[in-house]
Structure formats: structure tokens, C-alpha cells
Amino acid sequence: MTTTFRVYGEPVGKGRPRFARRGGRVVTYTPDKTAEYEQEVCDAFRAAAGYVWKKLEGPVQLQVTAYYGIPASAGKRKQQAMLDGAIPPTKKPDADNVVKIICDALNDVAWADDAQITVLHFEKRYWAIPYAEVTISGDE
């Protein structure tokens, strides 16, 4: 079973957990930006997969391509070079954090646990409209 979906907007990396003191106790919470992006990933997956998706139980292959928006401050030649792939995005968020937020968002939704991922491919590119494209493949 394979499905591909897109999460529109600038790709977001997994944020570190935050700690706060409340009533003399320390509580841990997820940053709002991380929680919102995880929800967007889930919503995009569910819209693409529909009701026919059954959680994958065996090995899973995951391909993530993060398309970053082209900075308006770049000149026309530089913008074209970015679109052509001659200038790759070497900016934050880090590749591992982008993959982590997508994997965590799809835990218990697309698969039982992200430990099932045996093949992972990630790319960063520039594009006119920023988004993340995710392809999930595996046996039912």
C-alpha cells in the first residue's frame, strides 16, 4: 500500500520539549508550533489516504521532500539557480528534525510505531510554494 500527500507551508522541524513550573511541580509540554504542524501532517495524511488506509504492520519505506520558499531578497539569477537545484537550501530546520516531526505525527496513524521505518529518503529543495511531500510505502 502506498500513499503520497503534501503538507503546505514552510516545513517545520521538531521542537524540543519545554518545561514549566506549575504549582511547585515541573511539567513538560510540546511547543505550540510543533503540535500544530503535527496536526497538519495528520490531517493531510488522512485526507490523502481516506478511510481505506489500514495501519501498516511490517517494514515501512518513507520518502520526504521538503520544498522551501525562495527568499524575496535573492536576485533573479540566484532565484533561478535555486529553482534549478544549483543552489540547495542549507538552512534550518535540520533534516533530522523535519523527518522526526513527520514520523512522530504519523505514529499510531499510518503505522504502529516509527521503528518500523526501514528505508528513509530525505531531500531539501527550493520551490515557489513551500511544502513537504511525503510518500509512505509498505505491506498491509
Image (cartoon, rainbow, N blue to C red):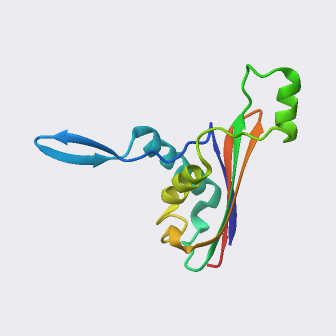
Determine whether 12 is above or below 71 in the image: below
Q: Nearer the viewer, residue 81 or 2?
A: 81
- The residue that appears at 59% across and 46% down in the rendered structure is 94
- The residue that appears at 54% across and 50% down in the rendered structure is 97
Q: Nearer the viewer, residue 7 or 17?
A: 17
- The residue that appears at 57% across and 56% down in the rendered structure is 46
Q: Nearer the viewer, residue 53 or 90?
A: 90
Lateral position of residue 109 relative to residue 47, left or right: left
Q: Position of residue 133 (x, y in %)?
A: 69, 51
- The residue that appears at 76% across and 38% down in the rendered structure is 126
Q: Position of residue 102 (x, y in %)?
A: 55, 54
Determine whether 58 is above or below 115 in the image: below
Determine whether 2 is above or below 82 in the image: below
Q: Position of residue 73 (x, y in %)?
A: 73, 19
Q: Position of residue 27 (x, y in %)?
A: 23, 47
Lateral position of residue 94 relative to residue 85, left or right: left
User: Quadrant where the N terminus lies?
Assistant: bottom right
Lateral position of residue 69 relative to residue 59, left or right: right
